[in-house]
């Protein structure tokens, strides 16, 4: 205001020369005033941070950055539009040895890979990918393991969970219970050597609670059953049972230890009968409940294994989640075992509830278990890949949503069951499920839905196997001929069943009555025989080819069981009807009615 008033006063006296001089000095004064005002309102000049403290705000910040004892994000100055710079005073950017130690200790690794491993969209990728080999059905001839292990290596699996069951060469009392085709010690050594040469981690699975049918079904071990009528669960509190469990653990641990062992799976799932035998009832009474008695046994088995070998002990989760956190802590189960959460459904949210994960929070380390075969029906002998792909997609989502709740999700076991249990029929054999295995592994490695685009599978197999039920010819993988022949049989069997259910002539003139009582029409039989031959000839050839290919991979008992379960009924029926039809077509005379004997001892005429 002072400057403006002086200027107006000077302009009114512009005619006077002296006043002009005054005007000149006044202008100088105004300029000086302007400089002073500008200086008073200006921001202090920005100084570049020293080279050692240059920061890119788009990088991950170091463990700790301090400016004047305040976090950096508290001291910002906006410059331009949409940009920020941090003002740092020289010498006050602190990042020393303490920070380096903090950064070092905060990093976690599995197999030398930084944990957690996430893909570009933040989905969890399991670093350990363990493929389950179930030998309680469809055990392979020893030589075939080399081909399996090379396949798993190519598919980027990192290990195997091998369930020996009755194929392990147990000695002593258990030698009377093992399979007649059980591997020799030399066989097992060769198998484990091959796995090691292929860079695969080997985890043995020994059932120590339920699923002990292979022992308990036998007369000389039946007295060890938890429930006398059911050969599934061992009377775990009985001292003789405990000795038997320790023998199994000792023999398997000894064999595997020669090749290096980091993990041991003790099973402990689906223990359906608890509280039947007297010894178990006493333990339940002492411990306070059925659930606590179960934990007591799981804890002592795990402690025994730890005492024998410095390994991590795995156990299926379903019996653990029935207990409380206080029980976990009391029996120290959370320090003794690593739970393996398993579910084989397509929609895991309906089966694996958030409460299951939260119940297991006391455990620092957990595992997941998906499936690639053997979980689509006990008599499903051809693979349905899409079921297993969806299961593994759902597991990716589950692990992504829950990995931060635990110190580690150690890895995933991709289960491949050969039977639903020891007493059940064979389901999908491994060769039939190889494409399913490849696509599920690729899904887990990518950490996302691939929607039919399985580039690694196509590259390795030199074919594009379907995700839906079906198959293609010409794929290149171990057992591919078995894969082709079993799927081909399925299609032929399906066509045959359709014919038998719907054909007009067959159902009218070659029924059981016609065959048994030799009574039919030769005119219709001529047409029927043509169609029976159409189905019979290729089926007989397929049966011979399939038996030959199966024999290259499996023991004779497995081959015979598979053929008896899935092939023989259709083939025998066709042969029987064809033979009967051929004989009837040449018959000239037929019996008069009534020729069917009554099912009752006497008949009453009305």
Image (spheres, grey):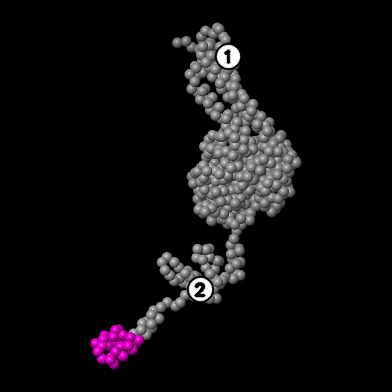
Which residue is more in the foreground, 96 or 517?
96
Of all residues shown, which one is farthest toward the bottom? Answer: 18
Residue at 55% from the left image edge and 76% from the top image edge: 91
- The magenta segment: 1-29
Residue at 29% from the left image edge and 87% from the top image edge: 6
Residue at 70% from the left image edge and 40% from the top image edge: 168
Which residue is more in the foreground, 14 or 286?
14
Left or right: 104, with 348 as reference point: right
Mark 2–mark 1 distance (CA, rounded to whole Å) = 102 Å
Which element carries disc 1, helix, strand or loop? helix
Left or right: 383, with 15 as reference point: right
The residue indicated by pointer 1 is 582
Q: Against 365, is 586 above or below?
A: above
Q: Position of residue 419 (x, y in %)?
A: 61, 37
Q: Against 123, is 476 above or below?
A: above
> Is residue 129 at least partly visible in the picture?
yes
Q: Is residue 168 magenta?
A: no
Alpha-carbon neighbours of circle 1 within 10 Å: few (<14), some, or many (≥20)? some
Q: Is residue 27 magenta?
A: yes
The residue indicated by pointer 2 is 48
Which residue is more in the foreground, 587 or 358?
587
């Amino acid at each position: 205001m002072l400057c403006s008033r002086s200027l107006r006063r000077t302009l009114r006296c512009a005619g006077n020369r002296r006043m002009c001089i005054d005007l000149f000095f006044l202008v100088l004064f105004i300029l000086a005033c302007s400089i002073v005002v500008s200086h008073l309102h200006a921001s202090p000049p920005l100084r570049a941070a020293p080279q050692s403290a240059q920061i890119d705000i788009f990088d991950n910040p170091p463990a700790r950055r301090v400016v004047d004892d305040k976090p950096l994000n508290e001291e910002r100055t906006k410059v331009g539009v949409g940009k920020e710079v941090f003002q740092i005073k020289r010498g006050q950017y602190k990042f020393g040895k303490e920070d380096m130690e903090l950064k070092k200790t905060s990093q976690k690794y599995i197999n030398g890979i930084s944990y957690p491993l996430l893909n570009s969209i933040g989905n969890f990728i399991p670093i350990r990918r363990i493929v389950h080999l179930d030998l309680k059905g469809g055990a392979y001839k020893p030589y075939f393991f080399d081909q399996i292990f090379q396949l798993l290596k190519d598919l980027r699996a990192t290990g195997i969970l091998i369930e020996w069951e009755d194929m392990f060469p147990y000695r002593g009392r258990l030698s009377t219970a093992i399979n007649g085709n059980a591997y020799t010690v030399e066989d097992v050594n060769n198998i484990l050597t091959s796995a090691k040469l292929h860079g695969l981690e080997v985890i043995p699975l020994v059932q120590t609670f339920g699923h002990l049918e292979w022992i308990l079904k036998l007369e000389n071990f039946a007295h060890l059953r938890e429930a006398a009528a059911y050969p599934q669960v061992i009377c775990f509190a009985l001292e003789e049972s405990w000795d038997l469990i320790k023998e199994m653990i000792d023999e398997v641990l000894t064999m595997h230890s020669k090749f290096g062992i980091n993990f041991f799976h003790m099973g402990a799932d689906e223990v359906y009968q608890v509280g039947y035998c007297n010894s178990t009832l006493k333990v339940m009474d002492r411990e306070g409940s059925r659930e606590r008695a179960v934990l007591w046994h799981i804890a002592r088995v795990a402690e025994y294994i730890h005492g024998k070998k410095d390994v991590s002990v795995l156990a299926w989760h379903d019996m653990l989640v029935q207990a409380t956190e206080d029980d976990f802590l009391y029996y120290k189960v959370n320090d003794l075992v690593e739970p393996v959460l398993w579910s084989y459904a397509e929609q895991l949210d309906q089966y694996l509830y958030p409460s299951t994960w939260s119940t297991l929070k006391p455990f620092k380390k957990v595992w997941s278990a998906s499936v690639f075969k053997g979980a689509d029906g006990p008599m499903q002998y051809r693979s349905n890949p899409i079921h297993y792909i969806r299961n593994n997609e759902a597991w990716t989502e589950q692990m992504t949503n829950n990995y931060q709740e635990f110190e580690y999700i150690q890895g995933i076991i991709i289960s491949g069951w050969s039977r639903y249990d020891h007493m059940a029929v064979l389901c999908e054999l491994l060769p039939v499920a190889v494409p399913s295995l490849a696509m599920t592994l690729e899904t887990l490695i990518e950490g996302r839905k691939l929607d039919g685009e399985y580039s690694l599978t196509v590259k390795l197999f030199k074919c594009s196997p379907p995700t839906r039920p079906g198959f293609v010819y010409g794929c290149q993988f171990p057992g591919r001929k078995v894969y082709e022949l079993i799927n081909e049989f399925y299609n032929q069997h399906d066509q045959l069943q359709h014919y038998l259910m719907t054909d007009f002539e067959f159902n009218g003139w070659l029924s059981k009555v016609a065959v048994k009582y030799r009574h039919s029409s030769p005119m219709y039989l001529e047409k029927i025989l043509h169609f029976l031959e159409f189905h019979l000839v290729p089926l007989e050839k397929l049966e011979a080819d399939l038996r030959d290919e199966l024999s290259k991979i499996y023991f004779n008992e497995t081959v015979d069981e598979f053929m008896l379960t899935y092939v023989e009924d259709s083939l025998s029926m066709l042969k029987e009807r064809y033979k009967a039809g051929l004989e009837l077509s040449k018959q000239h005379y037929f019996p008069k009615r009534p020729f069917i004997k009554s099912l009752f001892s006497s008949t009453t005429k009305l």
